[in-house]
Image (cartoon, grey):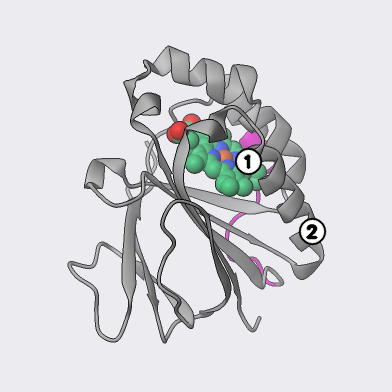
């Protein structure tokens, strides 16, 4: 498996990423902040004067099959490209009904019905993505999703997010916050 990378997103006054907007999509939002800093490792608390810290860890795939994995590796771009001055941090929690399902039932909804992977592939490599798992850390969200892209791909990102939010998978999302960010270069 890939190296374990624990990460903390710190919402406060400092950091590389300036906050453009914080929108509560479903459930409680997050306190407004000026900037988000990304720290390696899990911070124990909320360092003053930050308002919140979200912790997650990369992990193994739960849903990708071999063909999808090969397809992803062939086209996906790394986070942090020059010119990717726009980003989105979208923390997501799914409902107890989702977690009551078995893995095969979740897979049937995630890909069989909602086509999460196959419908999203066309947005690569313009959109670079990272998925951090947080549920097993007893965090307020189950997943921290992070994306970066060039300003000219912002409309495509909005289209992608709207498409995913219309799927059956998203009927199981009971908390989602959409944080949009920019950086200088
Ligand atoms: C850029 C195009 C995208 C691609 C190619 C993509 C692909 C994937 C893949 C392959 C997985 C499965 C990981 C695994 O096997 O465990 C996944 C999971 C996930 N993705 Fe996406 N995704 C995209 C965009 C998005 C967006 C825009 C969001 C949020 C708005 C999102 C939210 C999630 C979440 C929450 C999971 C975890 C689902 C779960 O484990 O229940 N994805 N995605």
- Where does residue 151 sit, x and y in percent of width and height? 76, 69
- Where does residue 146 sit, x and y in percent of width and height? 52, 56
Q: The residue tagged with tag 1: helix, strand or loop?
A: helix
Q: Is residue 136 magenta?
A: no
> What residue is pinned by disc 1?
165
Q: On the image, which quarter does residue 50 sit in?
A: bottom left
- The answer to whether residue 175 is left or right of residue 171 is left
Q: Earlier in the sequence, mark 2 or mark 1?
A: 2
Towards the viewer: 32 or 50: 32
- The answer to whether residue 185 is left or right of residue 139 is right
Whether residue 5 is visible, yes or no, is no
Q: CA distance from mark 2 to mark 1?
A: 15 Å
Q: Split into 4 quadrants, where in the image is the N terminus?
A: top left
- The magenta segment: 72-82
In this rendering, which labeled residue sits more in front, label 2 or label 1?
A: 1
> What residue is pinned by disc 2?
155
Instruction: Give the image quadrant in which the ligand numbered 1 is located.
Output: top right
């Amino acid at each position: 498996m890939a190296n374990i990378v624990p990460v903390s997103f710190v919402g406060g006054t400092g950091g590389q990423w300036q906050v453009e907007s914080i929108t509560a999509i479903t459930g409680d939002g997050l306190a407004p902040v000026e900037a988000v800093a990304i720290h390696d490792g899990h911070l124990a608390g909320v360092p003053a004067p930050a308002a919140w810290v979200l912790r997650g860890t990369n992990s193994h795939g739960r849903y990708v099959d071999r063909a999808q994995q090969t397809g992803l590796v062939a086209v996906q771009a790394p986070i942090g490209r020059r010119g990717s001055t726009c980003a989105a941090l979208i923390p997501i929690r799914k409902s107890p009904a989702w977690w009551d399902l078995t893995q095969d039932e979740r897979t049937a909804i995630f890909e069989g019905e909602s086509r999460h992977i196959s419908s999203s592939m066309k947005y690569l490599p313009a959109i670079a993505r990272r998925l951090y798992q947080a549920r097993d850390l007893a965090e307020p969200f189950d997943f921290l999703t992070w994306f970066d892209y060039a300003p000219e791909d912002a409309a495509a990102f909005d289209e992608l997010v709207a498409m995913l939010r219309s799927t059956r998978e998203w009927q199981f999302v009971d908390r989602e916050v959409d944080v949009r960010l920019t950086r200088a270069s």
